[in-house]
Amino acid sequence: MVDHGDTPFNLRPGAAPAATVGRTRELDLIEQLLAQAVLSGGGGPISMSGRPGLGVTAVLREIADRASSAKWAAGFSTADADLGRTIAATVNAAVERFAARRPGASRLPELRAINDRLRAERPDEPVAVRAPLLAAAEAMLDLNGGLLLAIDDSHLLGPHAVTLADIVTDIADAGLPIVAVFGGHPAAPVGLDFVLEPLQATDIARLGAAAGVPLHPSAVAAILDLSDGTPFLVQAFAEAALLAAPELPLGAEDVDSGRANALEDVIEAWYRPRTSGLTGSEHRYLRAVADLGAGSVFLRDIAHRLGDTRFGGTGAHTQELTTALVRRGLLWPDGDRVSFALPSFDSYFATYC
């Protein structure tokens, strides 16, 4: 019998063990870049995008962990519109983690001083960020490491993201080891670009093996069908199946038995928090997207339905709503089109909103 006291699957966005399943290529390439940056100097910016639930946050954290193990000062933080606050938080995380791992390292006082200055001043001008980042990269070079900044939701930085990427490129071109990984929507990709794709059947089977839970091929197929390969949903359906199973390996019948409970958990953990507090205008916008179809739709068609077609195109109000809903994680931008960011969101919206 299965012990239902605990499960190796955790219904949390980006939770292990799904964090790095199917992401070997991206992680290995970034590790190679870090190693090369220490050996010969350099690095630069990296973009990493993927729809909500595909594991961008988890991969960013894994990158920071691996860099830290390789003696880098590696920090992770979530961006906001304030560039200074974002950089200060990321560098602070990097320096504090490095100090915990190498408390007696030379130049550590200098790194702490750079960090303290950033936290105190929080420069709003991108050019003011260059000097402390340059000094930190120089200090890390002397310590046979580098400086890694892993910034999640980097699209919230707006145009600052591109400017910061240019600064990182400039410092790396000077032969100093610095890497910035920008995670978020692919509105303005910078540097080396990775797009996380949904998991495949082989990835889901490996996930089960990593968790010590054997999955029959029928269970793998059922989970893939229900989740669209989204790691967060894969975890949800696998966990619910395990809790419903009388024995191992898990089969399709176990996935079906746990399906209702999994959907309830997903709604509470993932869909409902994103839709709580929608304004009337935001609700009408999402209704327009749903009415136009669950796929990618033109902004001008949404604006037309909202009656916001000033100047013969997409009105400012539609643009503002688009930005707000993208930041909320409900919409996925693609040039002059948008689509729902979450799998099966159109069904949830029709039923619960």
Image (cartoon, helix red, strand yellow):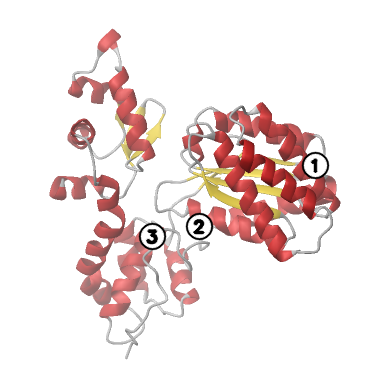
Q: How far apart are marks 3 and 1 (CA)?
A: 37 Å
Indicate the secondary structure of the residue bearing disc 2: helix
Q: Which residue is tagged 3? A: 232
- Specify the quadrant of the image occupied by residue 172: top right
Q: In which quarter of the image is residue 65?
A: bottom right
Which mark is nearer the camera, 3 or 1?
1
Q: Given contact means CB atoms under 8 Å apart, are the residues at marks 3 and 1 in contact?
A: no
Q: Nearer the viewer, residue 35 or 29?
A: 35
Q: In this view, does 259 lie above or below 165?
A: below
Q: Indicate left or right for 310 with 124 as reference.
A: left
Q: Which residue is drawn at 24% across and 26% down?
A: 302
- Kindly identify the residue that appears in the image at 81 percent across and 47 percent down: 139
Q: Which of 230 and 252 is in front in this view?
A: 230
Return the residue at label 1.
176
Q: Give neighbour class at mark 2: few <14, some 14-19, many 20+ (Cα, 10 Å).
A: many
Is residue 137 in view? yes
Q: Which of marks 3 and 1 is nearer the N terminus?
A: 1
Locate residue 240: give its quadrant.
bottom left
Q: How crowded is mark 3: few (under 14 residues within 10 Å), some or many (20 or more)?
A: many
Q: Residue furthest left?
A: 351
As drawn, the residue found furthest toward the bottom would be 1
Residue 262 coordinates in the image, percent (x, y): 26, 66
Residue to which mark 2 is pinned: 58
What amino acid is at disc 3?
A: Phe
Left or right for 35, reference 307: right
Which type of secondary structure does the marked residue at label 1 adopt?
Answer: loop
Q: Is residue 274 left or right of residue 131?
A: left
Residue type at mark 2 is Ala
Q: What percent of the width, then of the height, locates residue 75?
A: 62, 52
Q: Is the residue 288 above or below the residue 271 in the image?
A: above
